Amino acid sequence: MRARFVPYFAGILSGLLIGGILWLILSQPRGAAITLLPPPSPALLRIHVAGAVRQPGVYSLPAGSLVAQAVEAAGGPADGAWLDAINLAERVLDGDQVRVPYLVATGAEPPSPAATSSPGTPAPPVNLNTASASELDRLPGIGPSLAQEIIDYREAHGAFGSVEDLLSVPGIGPAKLEAIRDMVLVN
């Protein structure tokens, strides 16, 4: 008796399947169409390029840019620029200042960058109010994270009034201040 109902069930199931497929094909689409957005553009860095460049100023550069690209954005090096004194392959960070120094006016061969950091030859002092993270990082005991702390403090509280104001920066204590006191200044 069961075998007698099998063709009926098969016919009913086939009819439902065909009806469902036709309904899916012929019915109107529901819901809103999906709109794809373009990928976000990378954030631009604001870099101050100063010193021996053709057009000093503030420039917007893509993230990951190098000091060399910042110098080129400022029209390239000016006559008398001392490019060997800076690291052209260093990456710039937002808010950095790239200062290209001039050659010594005496006509003598300028000292090599290695010689400027050797003992006995003092490097020029770093201005706490304008120094980039890379300039601060070169100070003894100041790494990349502490250099960024100094910049963050400067941006949050304004320009440093004195070298002693560094004591307010998290991570700088009296011993560290004394170690760099003669290497920094405030203008």
Image (cartoon, rainbow, N blue to C red):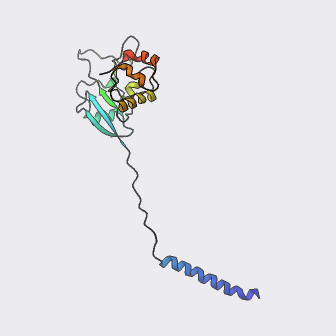
The image quadrant where one finds the C terminus is top left
**Residue sitting at x 29%, y 37%:** 59
Looking at the image, is 4 positioned above or below residue 115? below
Relative side of 55 to 119, left or right: left
Q: Percent from the top left, x then y, of residue 165?
A: 38, 22
Residue 37 location (% of width, % of height): 40, 56
| Whether residue 136 is situated above or below residue 27 in the rendered picture | above
As drawn, the residue found furthest toward the top would be: 120
Residue 28 vertical position relative to residue 124 in the rendered view, above or below: below
Who is closer to the viewer here, 45 or 155? 155
| Count of all numbered marks drawn on residues in the image | 0
Residue 27: x and y, percent? 48, 77
Q: In the displayed orientation, state which residue is furthest to the right.
A: 1
Give the quadrant of the N terminus. Answer: bottom right
For the residue pair 120 and 48, the one nearer the viewer reads as 48
Res. 115 visible in picture: no
In percent of width and height, residue 65 lies at: 36, 37
For residue 45, say whether it is visible: yes
* Rendered image quadrant of residue 6: bottom right
Q: Is residue 59 left or right of residue 89?
A: left
- The picture quadrant where one finds residue 64 is top left
Toward which corner of the image does residue 54 lie, by quadrant? top left
Residue at figure coordinates x 37%, y 48% from the top left: 41
User: Please, is residue 66 above or below residue 108 in the view?
Assistant: below
